[in-house]
Image (cartoon, rainbow, N blue to C red):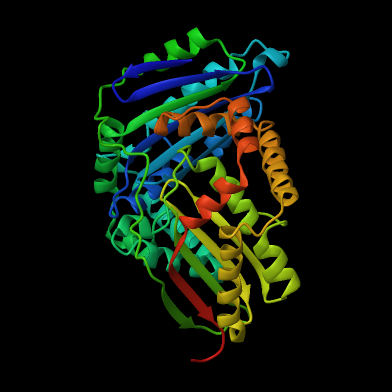
């Protein structure tokens, strides 16, 4: 059930008797801007660790414990040209407990307190908390950046999206932006988020829909712009291959490849693209896994992934640096084989079965329902589980070949070991 609480503010209730918990997500969505990404990530750190009602993590933990061990978290994410700041709480359903405490109502009130009563003094975020979370966010970003595969992936992003800086950096920002932030300006920016971001509230579980709606309506949301949110970013196809190389002291070289693939979430080629990716490099049955890693022993790992919100496919491989040219060629050979129909119907059936099993397993997760509701709200391309399964089953070998024909290798980043 969907209810518009104001222009640009939507409450979606997914009623399910499958789970013994209720999950509530509040998602703030805006067009992605390069100079705002790190700000939004830092705000999630502040909201996750403090508020006026819960000024430190001990007070937060106590409040969650009082709700029979509710789980609370905050984070950021990207979908195409949009950036989301998200808060979520999962609380036991009081209907399955021997208690009269209205846990779902308490969880809603908890989220509202976190969002609308942050820890603020004199028109700015609490300075000590702000300083601490700047340090924590920097440490978190730095720790991820130490991962060489992550580093190579980020360098590939810089090349793939050279014409759009906001698409180059991760959804949680970069450390160099932190030096320019202060507690006063960040709080002013947060007020703009509350006033202008599109808000999606998702409630999943066995809940009283009318009561949930009344509690969220009481916030008094105001209208906000809704015509600025496009669900997809169109990657610019170079039409040729450009590779950047870098040398570092490491034992395993990283070869990351970026392809233009103009297939978007649930468009006419979407389901065929899912099967194509599984066949190419997205599963242990794939051509990259079987031929590059297993038969030729040219890679420690080799896999592909789709981004159907930005129209790209990526391949990542851990290799011996001296095999660079051979690996590049054999990866291309696997794509050519699919274009030419060099794969068996039995293999297609197996990768379809893998997709279906993964999909059906995901239905055991309450969060799957919540995230799917958010994606449906963004794209307005909702399909039932039954239709999804039918579409996968209906994919033909000709459709797989047609998707392969759309693939164009654009960029590569090669992180080699040793000294240049």
Percent coordinates x, y for residue 248 in the rendering: 52, 83
Name the residue at 66% across, 73% down. Answer: 299
Q: Nearer the viewer, residue 33 or 232?
A: 232
Taking the image as shown, residue 221 lies to the left or right of residue 310, namely left
Taking the image as shown, residue 171 lies to the left or right of residue 69, namely left
Q: Nearer the viewer, residue 410 or 182?
A: 410
Residue 240 occupies quadrant: bottom left
Q: Is residue 142 visible?
A: no
Q: Nearer the viewer, residue 244 or 294?
A: 294
In the rendered view, tell whether residue 142 sits above or below residue 8: below
Residue 217 occupies quadrant: top left
Name the residue at 73% across, 51% down. Answer: 347
In the rendered view, tell whether residue 229 sits above or below residue 170: above
**In this view, which residue lies farthest toward the top?**
210
Taking the image as shown, residue 225 lies to the left or right of residue 153, namely left
Percent coordinates x, y for residue 404 in the rendering: 52, 56
């Amino acid at each position: 059930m969907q209810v518009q609480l104001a222009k640009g503010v939507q409450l979606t209730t997914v009623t399910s008797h499958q789970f013994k918990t209720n999950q509530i997500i509040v998602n703030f969505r805006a067009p992605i801007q390069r100079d705002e990404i790190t700000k939004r990530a830092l705000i999630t750190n502040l909201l996750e660790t403090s508020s006026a009602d819960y000024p430190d993590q001990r007070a937060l933990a106590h409040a969650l414990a009082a709700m029979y061990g509710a789980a609370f978290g905050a984070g950021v994410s990207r979908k195409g040209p949009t950036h989301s700041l998200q808060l979520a709480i999962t609380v036991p359903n009081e209907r399955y407990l021997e208690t009269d405490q209205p846990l779902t109502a308490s969880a809603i009130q908890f989220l509202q307190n976190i969002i609308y009563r942050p820890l603020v003094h004199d028109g700015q975020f609490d300075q000590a908390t702000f300083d601490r979370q700047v340090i924590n966010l920097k440490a978190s970003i730095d720790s991820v950046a130490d991962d060489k595969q992550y580093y190579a992936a980020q360098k590939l992003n810089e090349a793939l999206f050279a014409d759009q800086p906001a698409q180059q950096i991760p959804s949680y920002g970069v450390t160099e932006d932190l030096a320019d932030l202060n507690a006063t300006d960040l709080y002013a920016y947060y007020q703009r988020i509350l006033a202008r971001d599109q808000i999606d509230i998702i409630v999943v579980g066995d809940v009283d829909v009318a009561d949930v709606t009344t509690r969220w309506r009481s916030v008094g949301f105001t209208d906000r712009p809704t015509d600025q949110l496009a669900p997809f970013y169109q990657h610019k196809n170079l039409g040729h291959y450009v590779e950047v190389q870098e040398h570092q002291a490491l034992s395993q070289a990283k070869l990351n490849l970026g392809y233009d693939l103009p297939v978007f979430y649930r468009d006419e080629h979407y389901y065929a693209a899912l099967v194509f990716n599984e066949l190419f490099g997205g599963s242990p049955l794939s051509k990259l896994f079987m031929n590059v890693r297993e038969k030729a022993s040219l890679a420690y790992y080799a896999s592909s992934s789709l981004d159907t919100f930005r129209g790209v496919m990526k391949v990542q491989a851990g290799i011996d640096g001296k095999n660079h040219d051979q690996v590049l060629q054999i990866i291309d050979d696997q794509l050519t084989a699919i274009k030419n129909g060099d794969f068996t119907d039995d293999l297609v059936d197996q990768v379809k079965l893998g997709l279906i099993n993964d999909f059906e397993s995901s239905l055991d997760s309450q969060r799957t329902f919540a995230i799917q509701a958010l994606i449906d709200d963004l794209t307005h391309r909702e399909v039932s589980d039954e239709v999804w399964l039918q579409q996968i089953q209906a994919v033909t070998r000709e459709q797989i070949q047609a998707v392969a024909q759309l693939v164009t290798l654009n960029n590569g980043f090669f992180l080699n070991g040793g000294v240049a």
